[in-house]
Image: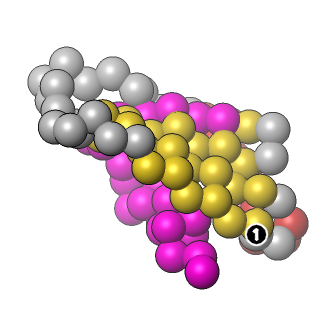
């Protein structure tokens, strides 16, 4: 299943995209997380990063301050793939 992570915002406003194909069995672990979603707004941090994370046909958007260790683990799956 295709995992796509897009990070935008920050001080420079640059957009970075990471992609990875992950096995269906591994993807099943992450689907409930994407179904719950997260908050994309964080008015206290105007220069923070924002993430759009897609896995299969599910997409979640969240702000940097909403990143839990679980979300970070999912992001790292895409970032650390060769």
Where does the image place residue 9, in percent across and percent down from the top left?
30, 34
Where does the image place residue 28, in percent across and percent down from the top left?
79, 60
Quarter of the image where one finds residue 15 = top left
* Quadrant of the image containing the C terminus: bottom right
In magenta segment, residue 73: yes
- Determine whether 29 is above or below 59 in the image: below
In magenta segment, residue 38: no
* Total residue callouts: 1
- Determine whether 18 is above or below 82 in the image: above
- The front one of 8 and 22 is 8
The answer to whether residue 46 is seen in the rendering is yes
Residue shown at 77% from the left, 56% from the top: 2
Residue shown at 68% from the left, 65% from the top: 20
Q: Tell whether 5 sits left or right of 14.
A: right
Quarter of the image where one finds residue 77 = bottom right
Residue shown at 83% from the left, 59% from the top: 1
Q: List the single residue furthest toward the bottom.
A: 82
- The front one of 64 and 19 is 19
Q: Please rate how many residues cluster around mark 1, counting C-alpha atoms within 10 Å: few if below 14, some from 14 to 19, many from 20.
A: some
- The front one of 48 and 40 is 48
Q: Which residues are magenta?
A: 59-82
Q: Tell whether 1 sits left or right of 82.
A: right
- Protein image colouring: secondary structure
Residue shown at 33% from the left, 21% from the top: 41
User: Mark 1 = which residue?
Assistant: 22
SS of the residue at dot 1? loop
Q: Tell whether 30 sits left or right of 75.
A: right
């Amino acid at each position: 299943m295709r995992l796509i992570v897009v990070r935008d915002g920050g001080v420079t406003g640059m957009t970075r995209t990471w992609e990875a194909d992950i096995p269906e069995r591994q993807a099943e672990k992450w689907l409930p997380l994407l179904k719950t979603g997260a908050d994309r707004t964080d008015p206290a941090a105007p220069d923070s990063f924002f993430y759009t994370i897609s896995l299969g046909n599910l997409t979640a958007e969240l702000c940097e301050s909403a990143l839990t260790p679980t979300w970070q683990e999912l992001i790292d799956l895409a970032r650390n793939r060769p």
